[in-house]
Amino acid sequence: MVTEDEAMRRAIALAARGLGTTSPNPVVGCILLDADGEVVGEGFHAYAGGPHAEIVALAQAGQRARGGTAVVTLEPCNHTGRTGPCSQALIGAGVRRVVIAVDDPTPVAAGGAVTLRAAGIHVETGVRRQEASQGNIAWLTAVRRGRPYVTWKFAATLDGRSAAADGTSQWITSQPARTDVHALRATVDAIVAGVGTVLADDPQLTVRDLRDGSLAIKQPLRVVVDSHGRTPKTARVNDAAAPTWVVTTSEIGAGPDGRVDLNALLTALHGRGIRSVLLEGGPTLAGAFLAAGLVDQVVGYVAPKLLGAGKTALLDAGVATIGDAIDLDLTDIAQIGPDLRFTATLRQKPSDHPARHPYSD
């Protein structure tokens, strides 16, 4: 017998399997328990347009779902898009109870709990809400702010250097850390870098298996912020390994500094169905994103090395005095090989922007 709390924990883990492939939809996991509390079905939303987590779990459970409990990380949808409403599927399957972690905040898909209760099904909400919300943070941020969730990733030495005095930067961190970065890349919809990084390092910005160098099947969109179109046609970001968008001021507009308007860029990415962005390279672009208040999370890989000179990992972020320092809340610290990885979120007030592109399956 499995408790509902244990089932929700499993559902949250299942939902994470959809990271990087479900946008513009959320990640969702579902566990179905029969009347005796035994697991009879489980599922997760694997890709946009595909069957929702509840539908996958119900297909596994069959008649054993009748009289049982559905444990789901997000309120079952109540509308018909490319798939039918999960609320009606649960009613039709004869479940007697539905346990929900997070209420759906979008006006199009919300209302599933009300529909279920009207059908005589007992509904409980808020079970492991914080944990499930964190697992769906990119989508929830996009709903609230009308822009993707932005994670700034950097690698540096203990004294904050991202390159030596002669410009060399390969490799500051170890292979285990670089492998970990590719796992991180696989969870996002887009990787953003500045033209300076492209010109200096010629990165490919893809998801690869570093054991054999093979490319992952699903690749994020590569975005090069290039105000004046200096990206060479021969740059590796222009190869056929993944889609690429070279963003210029003539296409997206310029901000007060004459460079690409970052707010407009994120709005445009949101319009393309991008819900999560990994900001990589370089220190000038990272500073601009931070100064504009457009970074939600920081993932730093710190190597046990000292350089004493060379390029720093971050340039001007709009901080003039210690009182203006950008405060972070550490959420995780882990040793990856010989390196240290820390994850932190920025302390900032949620935007009042309404959802401009609601849930769309």
Image (spheres, rainbow, N blue to C red):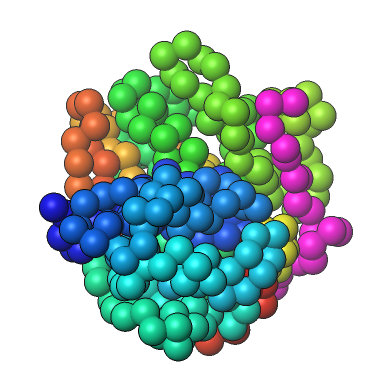
What residue is shown at x 22% (from left), y 38% (from top)?
340
Question: Which quarter of the rendered picture does the C terminus lie within?
Answer: bottom right
The answer to whether residue 78 of the structure is visible from this angle is yes
Q: Which range is magenta? A: 240-261
Count the numbered circles shown. 0
What residue is shown at x 31% (from left), y 48% (from top)?
40
Q: In this view, does 334 lie above or below 148?
A: above
Q: Which of 267 and 325 is in front in this view?
A: 267
In the rendered image, residue 79, in percent from the top left (x then y), is placed at: 62, 74
What residue is shown at x 51% (from left), y 15% (from top)?
213
In the rendered image, residue 61, in percent from the top left (x then y), is placed at: 39, 49
In the rendered image, residue 307, in percent from the top left (x then y), is placed at: 30, 31
Taking the image as shown, residue 240 lies to the left or right of residue 152, namely: right
What residue is shown at x 53% (from left), y 30% (from top)?
207
The answer to whether residue 152 of the structure is visible from this angle is no
Asked where in the image residue 160 lies, by quadrant, the reply is: top left
**245 falls in the magenta region:** yes
Q: Which of 242 and 8 is in front in this view?
A: 8
**216 falls in the magenta region:** no
In the rendered image, residue 254, in percent from the top left (x then y), is placed at: 76, 66
Q: Is residue 27 above or below residue 341?
A: below
Q: Is residue 222 above or below residue 236?
A: below
Q: In this view, does 184 lie above or below 336?
A: below
